[in-house]
């Protein structure tokens, strides 16, 4: 079966009940989004499995979704404003980010679970809260386990290989069995 090309018609659909099984296919997108919409990812949420994303999304927050259950997905899109895979909370399993972002490799603002994910993309930020896996935590339960960061991480304050900032009032956090091989730089 062929890969999917220019699937920009679904970007920003205000629904979170999608179930997408990509069957290992690659979506190639070439789109510039209005910087104002709430949803600036391929999918606003739902369950997304076994999907690869290439191309570019100008003004995109993340390549795959705004949240949801995301597994076995790979991002190769560069210059995303928030994160390579998910911009907000979710359950994120076995995902890989190879794209350059301005916040985090896997998820920007995180409440939920990130397991067995890898970031190889460079993370460069001129603001606070920058991380190889997650930029910052949201109040609630946070779990990051068995993840690897290989991409260098640069930011202004709260910069880390796994997570940039754990917010005050965090109810519960489990961060275990992770490895950072990258250079971490605060400027």
Image (tube, grey):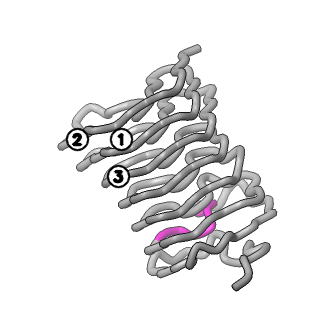
Q: What is the secondary structure assignment of the residue under circle 3?
A: strand
Name the residue tied to disc 1. 137
Label 3 to label 1: alpha-carbon separation: 15 Å
Percent of width and height locating residue 4: 73, 77
- Please report whichever mark, 3 or 1, sits nearer to the chain's N-terminal start: 3
* 65 lies above or below 106: below
Choose top left, top right, bottom left or bottom right for residue 41: bottom right
Q: Which mark is residue 115?
A: 3
Is 139 left or right of 125, judged from the image as shown? left
- Structural crowding at the residue carrying mark 1, measured as other residues with C-alpha within 10 Å and reported as few (<14), some (14–19) or many (≥20): many
Q: Which residues are magenta?
A: 39-45
Tell me residue 186's x, y (percent). Answer: 54, 16
Whether residue 153 is visible, yes or no, is: yes
Badge 3 local density, few (<14 within 10 Å), some, or many (20+)?
A: many
User: Is 155 included in the stretch rendered in magenta?
Assistant: no
> Which residue is the extreme one toward the bottom?
1
**What is the secondary structure assignment of the residue under circle 2?**
strand
Report if residue 163 is visible in the image: no
Name the residue at 31% across, 34% down.
167
Determine the CA span between mark 2 and mark 1.
9 Å
Residue contact between numbered discs 2 and 1, judged by CB atoms under 8 Å: yes
Q: Which label belongs to residue 44?
A: none
Earlier-in-chain disc, 2 versus 1: 1
Please give the name of the residue rendered at 70% of the width and 53% of the height, measured from the top-left corner: 77
Helix, strand, or loop for circle 1? strand
**Residue that numbered label 2 is attached to:** 173
Mark earlier in primary sequence (3, 2): 3
* Dot 2 crowding, Cα within 10 Å, few <14, some 14–19, many 20+: some
């Amino acid at each position: 079966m062929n890969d999917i090309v220019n699937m920009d018609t679904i970007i920003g659909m205000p629904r979170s009940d999608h179930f997408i099984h990509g069957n290992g296919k690659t979506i190639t997108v070439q789109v510039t989004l209005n910087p104002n919409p709430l949803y600036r990812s391929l999918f606003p949420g739902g369950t997304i499995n076994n999907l690869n994303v290439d191309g570019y999304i100008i003004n995109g927050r993340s390549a795959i979704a705004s949240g949801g259950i995301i597994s076995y997905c790979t991002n190769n899109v560069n210059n995303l404003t928030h994160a390579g895979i998910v911009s907000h909370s979710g359950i994120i399993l076995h995902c890989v980010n190879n794209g350059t972002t301005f916040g985090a490799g896997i998820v920007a603002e995180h409440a939920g679970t990130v397991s067995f994910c890898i970031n190889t993309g460079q993370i460069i930020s001129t603001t606070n809260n920058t991380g190889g896996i997650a930029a910052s935590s949201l109040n609630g339960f946070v779990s990051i386990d068995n993840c690897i960061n290989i991409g260098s991480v640069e930011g202004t304050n709260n910069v880390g290989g796994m997570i940039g900032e754990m917010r005050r009032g965090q109810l519960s956090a489990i961060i275990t069995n992770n490895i950072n091989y990258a250079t971490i730089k605060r400027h």
